């Protein structure tokens, strides 16, 4: 049985009581106003105090439950600049890309290689659909980690795609907005 509880934080970052169970959060679907709003930054000092720890655990459990590659806080109706993602077994030539579960707060990025690559994306907030989306090939990502420490790294190809897809959610953008080849929009299930 799934435990579907209300999100633990509202748009103002109001927290719920400590000691609550980790929860599977309800995922907002396309049409929910929260998916079209700009999310708010989190202060590093609030991270250092561990203020969002339970919420981060809830996001993790929710992403795993729904087999997501990534999840942004607005997708669980929380207007904060938080993204979570992981990459498993993504083939890159002879290599396989593995990125452990990574949570980024207030992520920003700089394009290092603007060569656009098109590939299919899907989204937990846009169920049953996928489409080709152009994204820059290589970016530098700057963010805070869960403890409030600044992090910076280079991401390319699928890794860059995931970070950019999730970061878009923080600005009220969904991948369908970026589709150029509309004929590529397709169902991922057979009815
Ligand atoms: Zn998405």
Image (cartoon, helix red, strand yellow):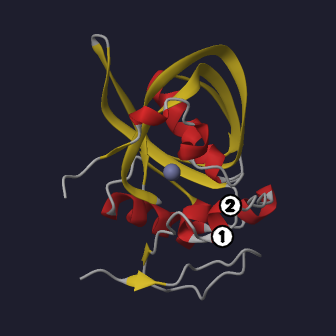
* Mark 1 Cβ and ligand 1 under 8 Å apart: no
Q: Position of residue 22 (x, y in %)?
A: 43, 76
Crowding at dot 2, Cα within 10 Å, few <14 / some 14-19 / many 20+, comes out as some
Q: Residue at x 19, y 52 (%)?
A: 190
Q: Position of residue 5 (x, y in %)?
A: 46, 84
Number of other residues with Cα within 10 Å of mark 1, as a class: few under 14, some 14 to 19, many 20 or more: few
Q: Position of residue 185 (x, y in %)?
A: 41, 40
Residue that lies at the very extreme toward the left in this rendered image = 190
Left or right: residue 85 versus residue 46 is: left
Residue 59 place in picture, x, y as percent: 49, 64
Which dot marks residue 36?
Answer: 2
- Disc number at residue 33? 1
Residue in front for this viewpoint, 126 or 41: 126
Left or right: residue 103 versus residue 190 is right
- The residues tagged by marks 1 and 2 sit, at their Cα atoms, a distance apart of 5 Å
Picture quadrant of residue 17: bottom right
Q: How many marks?
A: 2
Choose between 47 and 56: the one closer to the eye. 56
Taking 55 as reference, is 127 above or below it? above
Quarter of the view holding residue 60: bottom left
Assess whether mark 2 and mark 1 are in contact (beta carbons under 8 angstroms).
Answer: yes
For residue 25, the mark is none
From the image, which quarter does the C terminus lie in?
bottom left
From the viewer's perspective, tell me whether residue 162 is left or right of residue 40: left
SS for callout 2: helix
One can see residue 9 in this view: yes
Q: Nearer the viewer, residue 84 or 171?
A: 171
* Residue drawn at (67%, 71%) of the image: 51
Residue 145 visible in the snapshot: no
Residue appearing at x 69%, y 66% in the figure:
79
Indicate the quadrant containing the N terminus: top left, top right, bottom left or bottom right: bottom left
């Amino acid at each position: 049985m799934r435990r579907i509880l209300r999100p633990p934080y509202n748009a103002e970052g109001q927290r719920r009581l400590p000691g609550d169970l980790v929860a599977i959060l309800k995922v907002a679907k396309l049409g929910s106003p929260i998916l079209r709003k700009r999310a708010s930054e989190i202060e590093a000092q609030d991270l250092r105090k561990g203020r969002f720890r339970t919420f981060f655990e809830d996001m993790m459990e929710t992403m795993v439950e729904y087999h997501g590659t990534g999840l942004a806080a607005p997708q669980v109706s929380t207007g904060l600049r938080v993204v979570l993602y992981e990459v498993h077994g993504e083939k890159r030539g002879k290599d396989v890309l593995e990125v452990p579960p990574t949570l980024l707060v207030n992520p920003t990025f700089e394009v290092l290689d603007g060569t656009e690559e098109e590939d299919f994306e899907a989204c937990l907030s846009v169920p049953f659909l996928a489409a080709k989306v152009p994204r820059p090939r290589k970016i530098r990502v700057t963010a805070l980690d869960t403890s409030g420490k600044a992090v910076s790294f280079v991401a390319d190809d699928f890794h860059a795609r995931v970070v950019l897809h999730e970061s878009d959610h923080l600005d009220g953008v969904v991948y369908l907005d970026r589709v150029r080849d509309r004929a590529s929009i397709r169902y991922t299930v057979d009815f």
